[in-house]
Amino acid sequence: MSHLELRQLAAGHGREPVFQGLDLAVAEGEFIVLLGPSGCGKSTLLHAIAGLVDVQQGQVLIGGRDLTDADPAERGIGMVFQSYALYPTMTVAGNIGFALRVAGMPAAEVTQRVQRVARVLQLEPLLQRKPAQLSGGQRQRVAIGRALAREPALFLFDEPLSNLDAQLRTELRRELKLLHRQLGSTMVYVTHDQVEAMTLATRLVVMHEGRIQQIGTPAEVYGRPANRFVASFVGSPGMAFEAGTLRAGPQGQTSFVSPRLQLPLDPATLDHAPRDGQAVHLGLRTDQIRLHPDGPHEAAVQLVEPLGGQAVVWLDLGGCLLAALWSDAVLPTLDQRLRFTILSAGASVFDATTGQRC
């Protein structure tokens, strides 16, 4: 295992850096997920760590060693790409042990490592098969095994599940989680899929336009997003927003007020002292919308999305769409009016100008 530290890093594929002044510290044994939309710089950052992209400024330290200018082979990393990139004429065993043989490792030790990796990844029955005889999930496990056999100090994953179908993604995601628990290795994983990010990460690094927007556990990022971008990007269904102002009441009580909604706010949801009249956006997740026949609010059903054991019901509150969970077997009908309660605990408030959490 090895810790990773990035100091004032700038990198890109041309003269203009994709990101600059970036700082990040990854502790030994962490599973860090770089999450963000396409083009935010997360893959470029991973490639800069691996030495596949030239660093224009700053430092990359792995295990306390400055490896900013080191070749990829000298960094002690194992990298798994989106494409399996397996040698089609080699068996599974041959693919897993290829880099070891090229490095001059004795054949007996190569065989030992291949067997150990195959046992961890449940590939033992497949060792003599060629890639064409494997499923997509099995091929990606071989690609992971090839990296694992090198016994790297640091694992880097560049969207390794994006080419798989939904069921295989779920299965391999679970296997990666178990593999990290078993090995305790330091892992950095890139994805734009928030389900992958939330289920795999010990900490999330949310990126947008080459900048880190927030670093925290999945629960922290979901529950207390640092700004409106994070709030809108993380979570499914997405957070609903309503524009309004803050109003100071008696005994320090603060309320959110808009033409469609008035809601007393839980002081614990605010990071900073509110200003009376401050223009803000109120953010509400599904967790804060509770359907109840005696609820103080009422809205019409605009859309119902069945999810199996439950459904997501979209409510039109005068143009503001709110998502609520429905667990009854009989689904509501379109345009049916439902009553609900809004829980202020867990709501988010963002400054209308800066987008930062209030």
Image: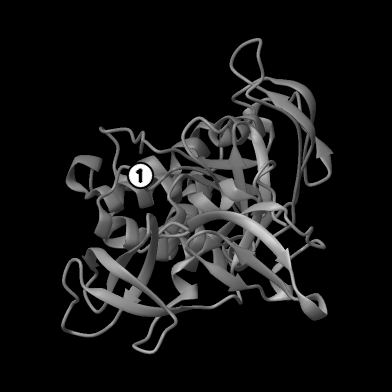
Q: Residue 172: in sight, yes or no?
A: yes
Q: In the rendered image of this protein, does residue 348 appear above or below residue 113?
A: below
Q: Is residue 13 left or right of residue 57?
A: left
Quadrant location of the N terminus?
bottom right
- Nearest the viewer among 275 and 107 is 275
Q: In the rendered image of this protein, does residue 193 appear above or below residue 12?
A: below
In this figure, which colouring scheme has been used for the structure? one colour
Residue that protrudes farthest toward the top in the picture: 15
Total numbered badges shown on the rendered structure:
1
- Nearest the viewer among 73 and 217 is 217
- Residue found 68% across the figure and 23% down from its top: 11
From the image, tell me which residue sits under label 1.
162
- Find residue 273 and report its image quarter: bottom right
Quadrant location of the C terminus?
bottom right
Q: In the rendered image of this protein, does residue 17 appear above or below residue 100?
A: above
- Residue found 48% across the figure and 68% down from its top: 178
Q: Residue 123: in sight, yes or no?
A: no
- Nearest the viewer among 124 and 303 is 303
Q: Is residue 330 left or right of residue 100?
A: left
Q: Amino acid at mark 1?
A: Ser
In the rendered image, residue 93, in percent from the top left (x then y), is placed at 36, 47
In the rendered image, residue 18, in percent from the top left (x then y), is placed at 62, 24
Mark 1: few, some, or many residues within 10 Å (few <14, many ≥20)?
A: some
- Residue found 56% across the figure and 69% down from its top: 262
Q: In the rendered image of this protein, does residue 83 appear above or below residue 238?
A: above
Residue that protrudes farthest toward the bottom in the picture: 294
- Residue found 58% across the figure and 32% down from its top: 41
Q: Is residue 186 left or right of residue 238?
A: right
Q: SS for tag 1?
A: loop
- Find residue 289 and report its image quarter: bottom left
In the rendered image, residue 78, in percent from the top left (x then y), is placed at 56, 43
In the rendered image, residue 280, in percent from the top left (x then y), is placed at 64, 53
